[in-house]
Amino acid sequence: MMDTSALTPFEARIEHAQLCERIARWDRAYHAEDAPEVDDATYDAAKRRLKAIEAAFPELATAASPTRAVGAAPADGFGKVRHAVPMLSLENAFDDQDVRDFDGRVRRFLGLGPDQPVALVAEPKIDGLSISLRYENGRFVQGATRGDGSEGEDVTANLTTLVARGRLPATITGAPAVLEVRGEVYMAKADFLDLNRRQEAAGDKIFANPRNAAAGSLRQLDSGVTATRPLSLFAYALGEVSEPVADSHSALLQRLRDWGFDVNPQARRCETVDDTLAVYHEIGERRAALPYDIDGVVYKVDRFDWQARLGMRENSPRWAIAHKFPAEQATTVVERIEIQVGRTGALTPVAHLVPVNVGGVMVSRATLHNEDEIARKDVREKDTVIVQRAGDVIPQVVAVVAGKRPEESVPFAFPELCPVCGSHTLREADGAIRRCAGGLSCSAQVKERLRHFVSRDAFDIEGLGEENVETLLEGGWIATPADLFRLEQRNSAGLQRLQNLKGWGEKKVAKLFAAIAARRTIALERFVFALGIRQVGEATAKRLARHYVTFAHWREAMARVAAGDPEAQAELTSIEDIGPSVAADLSAFFAEEHNAEVVDDLAAQLTLQDAQAPVSGTSAVAGKAVVFTGELTAMTRAEAKARAESLGAKVVGSVSKKTDYVVAGPGAGSKLAEAEKLGLTILTEAEWLALIGG
Ligand code: IVH
């Protein structure tokens, strides 16, 4: 990088403006959109350069410069909270010398001699987002984000979900009347992976890293969503307090613990700067094994009276510094891009890399997240890229090194067909994820689909848990649900015998066969649900079954929907709660020949019980009072009554002014005469049948 002394004022002004624009954009992406555009090292380097330019050209250091601002101004949608004590940022140290310089500055400021130790507390720098928790008279009353340092967002409702989950005390005893506790909200790595798995299964947004997941979860306008997100918190500082609560940082941490806050167990008081550096290296070595992401170690002067004397600069205290870990990044080449198909059919692009050492770990693959991400970053095969490893999370491609792109390079074409089974893929209307429509016929998904198939609310086959499904699948016993119903036959005929499998035995096998046999007869709605069609949960399956009543009717309608028959599609979307999106998933499922085969093969093994016809609000006879009189020929009286009632009609015994229809067969007597007298609508049996649709 060019030395700032070599810049002319004009060049400095231009570079300064460019850096300000870039940093402001990165800040916005990071703070307001929870979608970082660059890695921390690039960001830090840009900020350092900006500071160097401002040091050489002080006239450029205006109040609007990003070197003066902390974070982002509060977003719309949340109430604003003014911080009585500003929420500060920290100065960064990038190597041991920076830390020694810090120690030297502190001593000089306090006028201490070389033999007077300055004890520091070293604690992990948690990679989350800072928040302020206000307790009044021992009760939690308000929680706020940092925002721009002086004004943050009111996230009380969201933080209350942490109280509900026992991660924060609701009340504390022995606290001053006003007590603000500050700390970091974060998501543990395991919780993050779990959340992303759930998000993926539901077709929702996948978070890039635990920090983004934590930020996205805390900044939800609906605290009901936050309640489902596994957030945690470490307390590490104070804001406004009505009276002192400790005289040193180490004593404060103990009080916070006593009050019921989680305090990082790695925090250590160090007597000398060498001790702090030793702690830094120790924590650095354990970094990957810690259950949460950290991006450095923070050192704080332990004595509060010294902290008070040291005071603060523009937006960071003089008594603390963050010693960052080297960025776990490296540059390498993408050999090829592979599309992997997940358990739920999501297509994920993965970059196969020329192996490279990233922070001590060899990396040969990195995720490209999804179709949009690959397009946004324009990652292509043979590109030189920057890869990053954050904790235990799968390494990711941060950016392409544009200057190193080979001339013949072409944009990556995301496949339209599933690379595993060749089925069509479908992009969700509201998400970035493309999925294989192959379902039960795609070997990447079959395990998950079969697990669903045998689950409690689907086929509910006793004794056929996850593990057994896996054994049967991997042993080549089954590949589709229909195979389950051929299992017994295969077993008695085959060379391979189930009872010889480890841990199975005669009894277990016999029980399993009995459980399977018991499910040969099954309600249509369970069958529909068990197929695991996207967005067809239990309620939708029930609606479909009730509407189409028989398997044959449903199956035929689905074939027509898949073939694009507008009438069949209109009928489908006329069903309550079935909109175009569900209809599209049903259509995609049946348009896939493999799926249709799997369904028909399975149905051939079963006796599917018809669903009860709906009490239809749309039938012409719904809500009408009907009297049957005389002989009926097409059906018995009981049948006629049941059918009419299932359509929402009320069948009554005697004729009155309130009767809507009188269905009269041969031999009708006084009731018919009465109806004629009252001028009611009288129908023959054939007319009635025509009215109710045959
Ligand atoms: S102390 C006045 N301690 O790092 C000092 N900050 O880069 C207030 N952070 O805004 C911060 N772990 O969000 C402190 N153990 C820790 C921390 C920590 C993470 C964050 C915090 C702060 C940012 C500064």
Image (cartoon, helix red, strand yellow):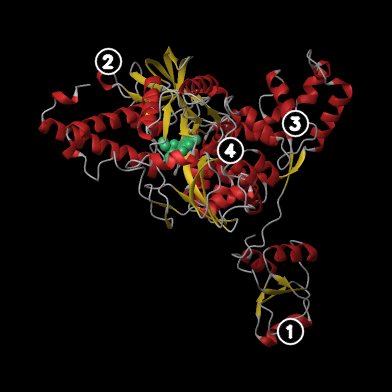
Q: According to the image, label 3 marks what residue?
A: 465
Pointers 3 and 4 in contact (C-beta within 8 Å): no
Could you say which is closer to the camera, residue 138 or residue 127? Answer: 138
Marks 1 and 2: CB-CB under 8 Å?
Answer: no
Circle 4 SS class: loop
Would residue 204 be seen by someone viewing this image from the given angle?
no
Of the pair 437 and 672, the residue shown nearer to us: 437
Residue 692 in the figure: left or right of residue 565: right
* Front label number (3 vs 4): 4
Tag 1 secondary structure: helix
Specify the amino acid type for callout 3.
Gly
The answer to whether residue 601 shows anywhere in this view is yes
| 1 or 2: mark nearer the eye | 2
x and y percent of residue 651 in the render? 74, 72
Give the Cα separation between the discs numbered 3 and 4. Answer: 41 Å
Q: Quadrant of ligand 1?
A: top left
- The residue carrying mark 2 is 406
- Disc 1 and disc 2: Cα gap in Å? 94 Å
- Closest to the camera, between mark 2 and mark 4, is 4
Q: Position of residue 481 (x, y in %)?
A: 69, 31
**Can you give x and y, in whole percent of width and height, for residue 258 in the image?**
64, 43
* Residue shown at 10% from the left, 33% from the top: 10
- The residue wearing badge 4 is 263
- For image coordinates 38% across by 54% down, the residue present is 76
Per the model, the C-alpha gap separating discs 2 and 4 is: 51 Å
